[in-house]
Amino acid sequence: SQQGEEDPQALSIQEGENATMNCSYKTSINNLQWYRQNSGRGLVHLILIRSNEREKHSGRLRVTLDTSKKSSSLLITASRAADTASYFCATVKYNFNKFYFGSGTKLNVKP
Amino acid sequence: EAGVTQFPSHSVIEKGQTVTLRCDPISGHDNLYWYRRVMGKEIKFLLHFVKESKQDESGMPNNRFLAERTGGTYSTLKVQPAELEDSGVYFCASSPLSLRDRDTSGANVLTFGAGSRLTVL
């Protein structure tokens, strides 16, 4: 399977704490993207990191990528109740416009 | 700008019946994808259109599934006859083909619809 796999499957934290989710994948990629899905809604793109990048920031989000270990992590700092959602990583192969998703991490941020 | 629209949002049918799901992508998006998520498992790729052509349909489960995209605009996904294991949420996503319309890094990102939940009894 080429898809990314997130862990943990579920994560429950208090508001204000940091949340870290991991993604592992098996094949070479062009870029890796993180998406969020609120219950009953579609997935929303959060952040993209290219294969030649190691770290990217966007607001309270920090993404790292280790291509040697074929893994990525998403850190949400100072979490809020509104961050409660499922988070998915998508691996994207070069020039194929193919996006592969995992099972997601279900994050619950308690107020 | 309207987003990706999917219809119906929820469909309940009996085994053996037929269901047709529709997806209206963002206007001008030539890439259109169908995905399915079953009971909290992975979001599984079904197929990919570029305009009206099927670029990749390797994820389609079997010949009970038929996807079309006539004219390269909206797409339909028909399941006939439906089986119990077809239950799940079917997502449609679109993205631009033109490099000019991509994000600042030149990479493509997907815009998803809210999904069509299919329940087969």
Image (cartoon, coloured by chain):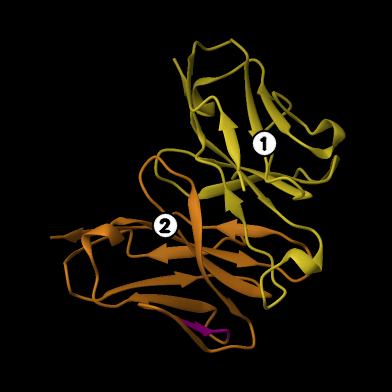
Chain colours: A orange, B yellow
Residue at the disc numbered 2: A104
Q: Is residue B32 left or right of residue A110?
A: right
Is the residue marked by circle 2 packed among few (<14), some (14-19), or many (20+) residues within 10 Å?
A: many
Q: Is residue B24 magenta?
A: no
Number of marks drawn: 2
> Foreground: A66 or B105?
B105
- Give the Cα distance between marks 2 and 1: 25 Å
Image quarter of residue B21: top right
Give me the residue at 73% from left, 45% from top: B27
Q: Quadrant of residue A19?
A: bottom left
Q: Type of residue at label 2?
A: Gly
Identity of the residue drawn at 77% across and 49% down: B28
Chain of the residue where label 2 is placed in the rendered structure:
A
> Height in image: A52 above or below B63?
below
Expressed as whole percent of the image width and height from the top left, the position of residue B2 reads: 60, 44
Q: Quadrant of residue B59?
A: top right
Instruction: Tell me the chain of label 1.
Output: B
Q: Residue at x 63, y 62 (%)?
A: B109
Helix, strand or loop for disc 1: strand
Q: Nearer the viewer, mark 2 or mark 1?
A: 1
Residue B6 image position (x, y, % from top left): 58, 33
Q: Which residues are magenta?
A: A62-67
**How many residues crowd around disc 1 within 10 Å: few (fewer than 14), some, or many (20 or more)?**
many
Answer left or right for A73 relative to A81: right
Residue B117's spot in the image, x, y percent?
A: 47, 30
Mark 1 is on which residue type? Asp
Number of the label disc, if any, that sits on residue B24 = 1
The answer to whether residue A28 of the structure is visible from this angle is: no
Helix, strand or loop for the magenta stretch, by majority: strand
Q: Quadrant of the C terminus of chain B?
A: top left
As drawn, A90 above or below B23: below
Q: Are marks 2 and 1 in contact (CB under 8 Å)?
A: no
